[in-house]
Amino acid sequence: MRTVTGPTDHVVVVGAGLSGLAAALHLLGAGRRVTVVEREALPGGRAGRVELGGYLVDTGPTVLTMPELADDAFAAVGDSLYRRVDLIPLDPAYRARFADGSTLDVHTDGDAMEAEVRRFAGPAEAAGYRRLRSWLEQLYQAQMRRFIDTNFDSPFQLLHPDLARLAALGGFGRLDPGIGRFLSDARLRRVFSFQALYAGVAPARALAAYAVIAYMDTVAGVWFPRGGMYALPRAMADAAGDAGAEFRWSAEVTELERSAGRVRAVRLSSGERIACDAVVLTPDLPVAHRLLGRAPRRPVRLRHSPSAVILHAGTDRTWPELAHHTISFGSAWERTFEELTRTGELMSDPSLLITRPTTHDPGLAPEGKHLHYVLAPCPNTTTGPPATSWHELGPRYRDSLVAELERRGLHGFGGSVDRELLVTPVDWTAQGHAAGTPFSVSHTFAQTGPFRPRNLVRGWDNVVLAGCGTTPGVGVPTVLISGKLAAARITGGDRPGRVHTPPPRRTVVPSSKGTADDPT
């Protein structure tokens, strides 16, 4: 594995998002002095926090899987995720609602999910689910250490027995047909293939290897940090501070001082100069490339994932049909992905993710209120409407989403809204995200593994990238890994493996304020 050359005693980490905080913790654990520079006044990056008239709103991801990857960062400094954060296991992990009126609860326990599939679609599909679950587990085992949690220096690193194992499992086929080998019910196939959208590729075109995301969601388990997803970066920042990291909040890096191929210091917008031996850059690629002075040459221009419109709505009521996470599928499927990834149109029959964090933490809203997060995928600004058009388009699309929610059974949703925040591609663009998408570079074959933008920067001896635009890719688990991999480029290797204590599985007592089964 190639590493940063020369001294690495003092490392500046640019950005206190999940990747930057993971990198900081692993660097601290390896004995480095670390300064974290963050342009916002609080940690989190994409996983930030906004206070909205008494509602505490998570601005980024709402789904936490593979918490042991976060614990790995805490363990680097002798700390523990489970000491810092109260993790609540979600059961169901999701509730899927379909256009025909049917509903499926997605359980991560194999026996419970087999029984649910049998109720939903019959014994043949239940047997198929068991075979699918085994295949997902095998895919995960074949990929994790060799293709996800690894630093690539050359495509030749793919030439390993695990590559043959992955091929034998059908990992280089297409995702939708791969799922179809086990399940014939079209609704069930959606439940185990919609995750391809996280990778920015339609299920019909995505590699079957990306079923590993379905493994994380439907087998490994989904968790909710009490206090919202922001509790995770807040705890990581606290642990890093306790381990000796220095934080500069509301401080933007405007220049990298370079001499003889090395960054000697970072300069802040305030004029302050911070001398350093190495730098970890975690902003989205356009911002990182601007600081570096250029973008690396690639034979083909980078392609980006679809974007999203998010409606954060504080309401005075909720609805019994909602779980913590509810996926509301439209009738269309192939056409939806065609619109999102090729024709650049807004979804004519949208599939939506609706998250209600107050299901398990009423304290995120004022007394008697509820918080709902509605995510509608949309084309990015390269494929679809340009960012500036969303100033006018956004409010209209918001109204159409509310009308669609009410048509699907959330009667009175529009009238119940007490506070709201609408986020569209124009907002993602303003934050520096390429193509107006928070999901960064898509996971086509040519942008995966050793073909994804490398975390070592050619021509810069002591700069490393981290975050969703570099290896291994998009999503909370992979972004946490990217921070660890960036730290390994500086420290010279991974720290010894650790045995993680899994978070306790416990029964959650329904809140009197309203849960999926007990709305008030």
Image (tube, helix red, strand yellow):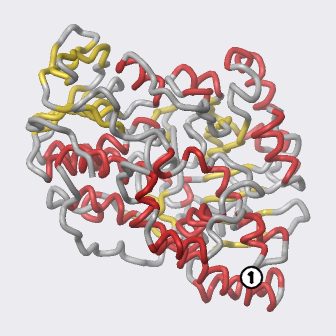
- From where the camera sits, is residue 86 visible? yes
Q: Could you tell me which quadrant the C terminus lies in?
A: bottom right
Q: 198 or 2: which is nearer to us?
A: 2
> Relative to residue 342, is residue 388 depicted above or below?
above
Task: Report helix, strand or loop for mark 1.
Answer: helix
Camera-nearest residue between 193 and 51: 193
Comparing 296 with 325, the one in front is 296
In percent of width and height, residue 242 lies at 13, 46
The reply to whether residue 43 is in sight is: no
308 up-or-down from 182: above or below: above
Residue at image point 16% right, 38% down: 5
* Disc 1: which residue: 117
269 and 352: which one is in front?
269
Type of the residue with mark 1: Val
Q: Residue at x 89, y 56 (%)?
A: 331
Question: Residue 174 in the image: x percent, y percent?
Answer: 72, 62
Rendered location of residue 440, percent (x, y)? 55, 37
Residue 393 as seen in the image, left or right of residue 407: left
Side of 101 where 326 appears, left or right? left
Image x and y of residue 434, in percent: 56, 27
Q: Which corner quadrant of the image does residue 301 belong to?
A: top right
Disc 1: CA contacts within 10 A as few (<14), some (14-19) or many (>=20) = many
The residue depicted at 69 percent of the width and 60 percent of the height is 322
Residue 260 occupies which quadrant of the picture?
A: top left
Describe residue 275's horizontal placement relative to residue 336 as left or right.
left
Q: Residue at x 61, y 40 (%)?
A: 314
How many marks on residues? 1
Vertical relation: 412 (above or below) 359: above
